[in-house]
Image (spheres, helix red, strand yellow):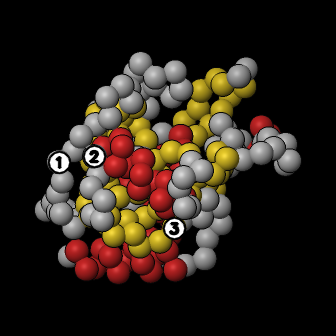
Amino acid sequence: MANDVVSRLRAALDRPGTSSSDFDLNPDTAPPADRTLRPAGVLVAVSLAYTEPRVILTKRSSALKHHPGQIAFPGGKQDETDADVTAAALREAREEIGLPDGLAEVLGHMPRHETVTSFRVTPVIAVLREKFQVVPEPGEVEEVFSVPLDHVLRPQNYLIESRRWRGRRRYYFTVPYGPYYIWGATARMLRALADRMQE
C-alpha cells in the first residue's frame, strides 16, 4: 500500500497545476497586484507508518496573537538561513512537532498558495515511513494530530462556508474531521491536492 500511495502522490505532483489563493472564492476582495509577498513553506507530511496513510497537522496555541487555535501544517516563513522553502518547511517541522532530520522523504511541491496575510506558501509534499516521538513546540503548538489521507482526498468532504471579515463576507473551504475544524488556507491547499489526485 505504501508504494501505491507514493506512486499516486508522485503522479499527482507531475500533473500541471495552477497556484491557489485565499482569494479564489472572493475575487471581489483581491489585493493589489504590486504587493510584496513573503516566501514560506509548509510540510504536507503523509505518514505511512499507520494502518492507513495519515496527514500530520497541528492546532496552533490559543494564546498566539495570529491565527490562535487554527489548524495548520507544520511550516512557516523562509528565513535568511534557509536554503529554500523546502528547508524552511523541514526546519519548522523540526521546531514545531519534533520531526527528526532525514525522516521526511520529500516527493515534490504543489503550486504556491497566496494568503491574505501576504505570504506565498509552497506546500512541500513528503512521506514518513516511520513513526517518531512528537514534541509540540511550547507556546506555539497546542496539539499535533493526524487525519486519514483518504478523508482529505475526497472532494465531497469539502464545504464552502463564510464569515464576516474586515467588514465583508469572506468565503472559504472547510474539511472538518471529528473535533477538528480544518479551514482557510490549510483546507484550500488540501483541496488542491485532492483535485490533482482525482485526475
What is the total number of numbered labels drawn onto the structure image?
3
Binning the other alpha carbons within 10 Å of mark 1 as few (below 14), some (14 to 19) or many (20 upward) gives few
Q: Quadrant of residue 172?
A: top right
Q: Amino acid at mark 1?
A: Gln
Q: Secondary structure at mark 1?
A: loop
Residue at image x 35%, y 81%?
7
**Mark 2, residue position:** 98
Question: In the image, which is nearer the foreground, mark 1 or mark 3?
Answer: 1
Q: In the rendered image of this protein, does residue 105 appear above or below residue 66?
A: below
What residue lies at 65% left-to-right and 33% top-to-bottom?
170
Q: Position of residue 126 (x, y in %)?
A: 37, 65
Snapshot quadrant of residue 15: bottom right
The outermost residue toward the left is 51
As drawn, which residue projects farthest toward the front? 81
Q: CA distance from mark 3 to mark 2?
A: 22 Å
Q: Where is residue 127? Give x, y as percent.
A: 31, 66
Marks 3 and 2: which is nearer the front?
A: 2
- Reading the image, the residue beneath label 1 is 133
| Disc 1/disc 2 C-alpha distance (Å) | 7 Å
Q: Which mark is residue 187?
A: none
At label 2, the amino acid type is Gly
In the shown orientation, is residue 78 left or right of residue 30? left
Is 114 displayed left or right of 45 in the figure?
right
Q: Residue at x 34, y 49 (%)?
A: 94
Mark 3 Cα within 10 Å, few/some/many (few <14, many 20+)? Answer: many
Give the vertical position of 65 relative to 123 (above or below). above
Tell me, for residue 109, which label it has, or none: 3
Q: What amino acid does circle 3 point to? A: His
Where does the N terminus fall, quadrant-wise? bottom left
Asked which secondary structure carries label 3, the reply is strand
Answer with left or right where residue 125 lies relative to residue 25. Answer: left
